[in-house]
Image (cartoon, helix red, strand yellow):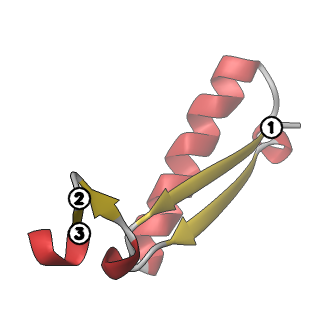
């Protein structure tokens, strides 16, 4: 069954709940599988650990 991994910035419990619900719904529809078959993993990355264009995200915000 599908396992979907998301890497991004720190998010609140409410934001993660919404993200999991919405992505599960879309993946379920696309794969034509029940929502119970979809697994979502979220990995939070501190902005110091991510670089874009040669700069840390923490320096860009």
The kind of secondary structure element at disc 2 is loop
Q: Quadrant of the N terminus?
A: top right
Left or right? Give the position of 58 relative to 20: left
- From what the image shows, is residue 49 above or below residue 35? below
Q: Residues within 10 Å of mark 3 (few under 14, many from 20)?
A: some
Residue 41 percent location from the top left of the image: 67, 60
- Asked if marks 3 and 2 touch (Cβ < 8 Å), the reply is no
| Residue under label 1 | 2
- From what the image shows, is residue 22 above or below residue 7? above
Residue plotted at (81% across, 34% down): 34
The kind of secondary structure element at disc 3 is helix
- The part of the image, by quadrant, that contains residue 55 is bottom left
Residue plotted at (23% across, 69% down): 57
| Residue under label 2 | 54
| Residue under label 3 | 57
Query: Which one is closest to the eye, mark 1 or mark 2?
Result: 2
- From what the image shows, is residue 16 above or below residue 31? below
Residue plotted at (32% across, 76% down): 47
């Amino acid at each position: 069954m599908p396992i979907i991994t998301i890497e991004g910035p720190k998010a609140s419990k409410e934001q993660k709940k919404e993200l999991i619900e919405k992505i599960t719904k879309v993946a379920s529809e696309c794969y034509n599988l029940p929502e119970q078959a979809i697994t979502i993993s979220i990995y939070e990355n501190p902005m110091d650990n991510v670089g874009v264009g040669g700069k840390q995200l923490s320096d860009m915000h």
